[in-house]
Image (tube, rainbow, N blue to C red):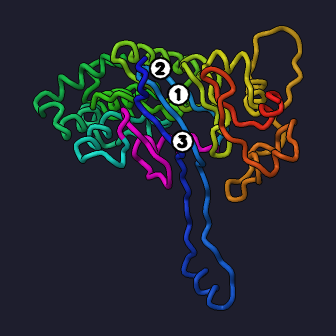
Amino acid sequence: MSAQPILTVKGLAKTFVKPVGLAGRIANLFGANEKRLEIRAVSDVDLSVAPGEVVGIVGESGCGKSTVARILAGISPRSAGEIAWQGVSLDAMSPAQRRDHALSVQMIFQDPFASLNPRMRVVDIVGEAPVAHGLIKASERRGYVAGLMEKVGLSAAYLDRFPHQFSGGQRQRIGIARALAVRPKLIICDEAVAALDVSIQAQVLNLFMDLRDDLGLTYLFISHNLGVVEHISDRVVIMYLGRVVEVAATEDLFTDPNHPYTKLLLEQLPVLEPGERDYQPIRGELPSPLAPPPGCPFNPRCPHAMPRCRSEVPALRPIGPGRLSACHLNDRAAA
């Protein structure tokens, strides 16, 4: 892997704002105190991805991982922070560089049916973008799409079918072919196998790894399934309530987790061992992003929380070679 990351993210933040409506503004004229709602979905996320690497992003629903994915794919604008592609900041790119970046980063979505246009045939779904961007000629479209279909494990005889004529696993392969059609370097998979049967999940995961080897792809793999992430990822990023709380190589994280949240997540994994197991779910519920707790966002649910945790947000800092964690307990251990 190259020393220079293909993607670098620093201080990424996203705030969703719901302004005061007409009724609220009228009520304010009579002394009401209606205010706009602000939801901090992502806060100060730092991330780097090396060429050819598979980085998994894991967390509970609502932790901000899909928001990060949509920002990095260019679907949603960021509120703050800097994104650099191959060492060049997106803010400093020329129009030609922005176009190349947009084609180089593609996304595969969770629902393979909702992400495909039901009125378009496969040859148009997959072949529209490369023709529009001048990667191939219109006359080359059928042959080009046929090659992509075979690459993802589907027959070229399916080119004129509609999405509803395929199974869920086949539709997801069409989504993968569509992403590959513009010759990307980085593919962002947002829960790309969550809607599939377990046996089909394994097939699609193996396809991802084969494509990585054949095409030199880099993946940002977003999932709530730790078992899937362990299988496919080189490095894992754990998120909680919009923040990164731990980063480590996959083997290190699964054998020796550092952050209390990571430890509790791993305790939820099923194990193939005889005998009974005392299952203890993570206590409490994920706090609302409308009213996040002060200090460490995990402190209301953490079994090791101390007074400092309730007043000071822990910084994400190195705790070993290639490892980062955001926990005040590491300061106590180092003392």
Question: Circle 1: is it few (<14), some (14-19), or many (20+) Cα within 10 Å?
Answer: many
Q: Which residues are magenta?
A: 63-88
In x, y percent, where is residue 83? 43, 42
Kindly identify which residue carries mark 1. 193
User: Please, what is the three-letter code of the amino acid marked with disc 3?
Assistant: Ser
Q: Residue at x 67, y 36 (%)?
A: 245
110 sits to left or right of 323: left
User: Please, what is the three-letter code of the amino acid marked with disc 2?
Assistant: Val
Asked which secondary structure carries label 2, the reply is helix
Give the number of the disc on residue 204: 2
Query: Are circles 1 and 2 on residues that touch, CB within 8 Å?
Result: yes
Q: Residue at x 32, y 40 (%)?
A: 102
In x, y percent, where is residue 140? 13, 27
Which quarter of the image is occupied by the N terminus? top left
Question: Circle 3: is it few (<14), some (14-19), or many (20+) Cα within 10 Å?
Answer: many
Q: For residue 70: magenta?
A: yes
Of labels 1 and 2, earlier in sequence is 1
Kindly identify which residue carries mark 3. 66
Q: Nearer the viewer, residue 144 or 52?
A: 52
Mark 1 vs mark 3, foreground winner is 3
In x, y percent, where is residue 162? 32, 34
Which quadrant of the view contains residue 274?
top right
